[in-house]
Image (cartoon, rainbow, N blue to C red):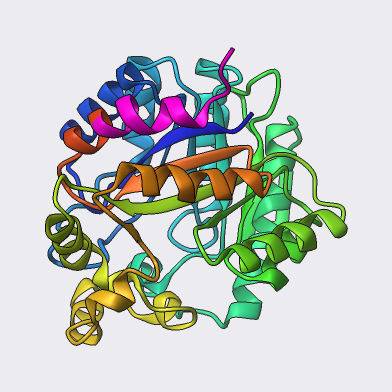
Amino acid sequence: MTTFGFHASHEQIGPRALLEAVKHAERAGFDAAMCSDHFSPWSARQGESGFAWSWLGAALQATGMPFGVVNAPGQRYHPAIIAQAIGTLGAMYPGRFWAALGTGEASNEHITGDPWPRKDVRAARLRECVDVIRALLAGEEVSHDGLVRVDRARLWTRPEEPPALVGAAVSVATARWCAEWADGLITVNAPVAHLREMIDAYRDAGGRGPLHLQVHVSWAPEQAQAEAIAYDQWRSNVFAPPVCWDLETAEHFDVVSADVSAQRVAEVVNVSADLGRHVGWLEEYAGLGFDQIALHHVGQEQRGFIDAFGAEVLPKLRPTG
């Protein structure tokens, strides 16, 4: 049975309000949660960017749900520090935390002042980071000299069972590559044929573990309002790689998205005031075999979405009897 979770967007909502939202989501019937990990929002209109790892400790304590985070080790974050963060949360909340690892975006990573590498170099760097993190979580002392450098690192606080390290992918090729090392796969909503191809590539290459999907939705009682929310908050997020990987600031995203149409936004966000239509979309995703689907309402106000989906959408997605 597919688990339906709440996605907490640090780029759009301040951490105090986001904590209240995730607590409310649990009360409303959401079974899990996950969050982003950004230094910068995608647009000045979004206007937030709380530190995910501080927030996760509070969110795990305030709820009983399992949580995940999407993280990019290697530049802004040293992999030994990420291993320590994963290990600490795993020790405090056994069985409730997982981390998805990806190659990142320049908008977050450029802050170090280091050059932003080519995609192939970022992938190789991530692979090194994964090996470092796994070894540290296994209790090994790690020294490594490569695209990342580690000197005699050891984690003194570790969970009995290391949290899952999930591969983050948006392309078929990356999904296939993630099968080499990941404990699961996460991607974002896309045409069903593309999602099916990604799943097949991951599984056919030997990929193990659960399949996660993050779904961008925009709902409001009136269709025009749902469309306006999506257009205001998410039109800077319509660009396919490599554009979304390589732009450096929120201002850059706002400039290039100035002429984006509402129709283009609807290609990446499920926009509808009709809750039945959202049920249909989610049923189709679940039918592909996703084990967990995290719903991201792209608006900054979450309560109405949480209440409506908790009452009218989630019950229709669960088996009866």
Q: Is 174 placed above or below 263 here?
A: above
Q: Is residue 317 magenta?
A: yes
Q: Quadrant of residue 236?
A: bottom left
What residue is at 40 percent from the left and 73 percent from the top? 106
The span picked out in magenta is: 308-321
Residue 147 appearing in the image = no
Residue at horizontal 40 percent and vertical 76 percent from the top: 244
Q: Position of residue 246 (x, y in %)?
A: 41, 80
> Which is nearer the eye, 133 or 213?
213
| Residue visible at 25% across and 86% down in the picture | 256
Is residue 191 magenta-colored? Answer: no
Q: Provide residue 126's location: percent of width, then percent of height.
A: 63, 62
User: Residue placed at 38% from the left, 37% from the top?
Assistant: 53
Residue placed most toward the observer, 277 or 214: 277
Residue 9 in picture, x, y percent from top left: 30, 47
Q: Quadrant location of the N terminus?
A: top right
Residue 273 percent across, percent down from the top left: 24, 50
Position of 10 relative to 229 (above/below)? above
